[in-house]
Amino acid sequence: SLPVLAVVGRPNVGKSTLVNRILGRREAVVQDTPGVTRDRVRYRAEWAGRPFILVDTGGWEHDARGLDGRVAQQAEIAISLADAVMFVVDATVGPTSTDEHVVRVLRRSGKPALLVANKVDSHRDEADAATLWGLGLGQPYPVSALHGRGSGDLLDAAMLLL
Ligand code: GDP
Ligand code: MG
């Protein structure tokens, strides 16, 4: 069976936009209202001739429980079902307490992960990405899921984990 790459992170950081970028077509639901993606959606994807399953996650915003716990719980499920993980953070916001929850889940899982610093739309925004070194997951990959900036380097790195 194909290797599974899960895309996790807080609502509105650009997970579905990144999934669309990787799929090369409009398919995952992107909305300005956070939390639109329901649970986990699986897509067949390919990069550099290698097929894999790409999992978009979301749909946590409207749960009655605290957002931190919900995001961490849903991330935990997606991570446990994945071979490798893209953890997406909004570089224009910087690391939040919810992001730190997800880092703990990732650490516990032992799964290989890449830290995606999304919304780095231009060279000017790259300083934003540098603040994410503080999450302790190593090098942040600066990406603009919206415009495609950095997505090739990110995918090259992801293929090494699958
Ligand atoms: P999700 O909730 O994590 O799946 O986030 P979405 O993919 O639905 O995106 C949330 C919002 O962020 C939408 O308005 C997107 O257009 C916007 N967005 C996503 N990626 C980028 C990016 O690289 N740059 C900018 N400026 N906006 C982005
Ligand atoms: Mg989404």
Image: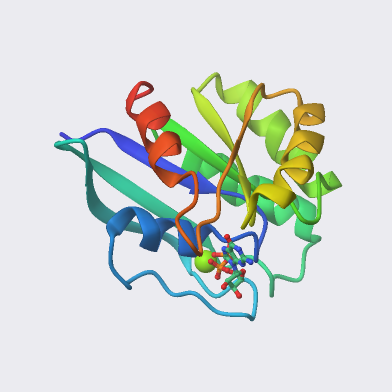
Q: Residue at x 76, y 34 (%)?
A: 130
Q: Nearer the viewer, residue 123 or 155?
A: 123
Percent of width and height locating residue 121: 61, 58
Location of the N terminus (image quadrant): top left
Percent of width and height locating residue 26: 33, 73
Q: Is residue 139 above or below residue 44?
A: above
Image position of 152 (left or right of 57): left
* Quarter of the rendering containing residue 107: top right
**Is residue 89 in view from this perspective?**
yes
Q: Residue at x 44, y 46 (%)?
A: 151
Q: Is residue 24 above or below residue 78?
A: below
Q: Residue at x 40, y 57 (%)?
A: 19
Farthest residue, direction right: 97
Percent of width and height locating residue 15: 52, 57
* Quarter of the rendering containing residue 104: top right
Q: Is residue 32 above or below residue 19?
A: below
Q: Is residue 39 above or below residue 96?
A: below
Coloration of the structure image = rainbow
Percent of width and height locating residue 89: 67, 48
Labels in figure, total: 0
Q: Nearer the viewer, residue 116 or 66?
A: 116
Location of the C terminus (image quadrant): top left
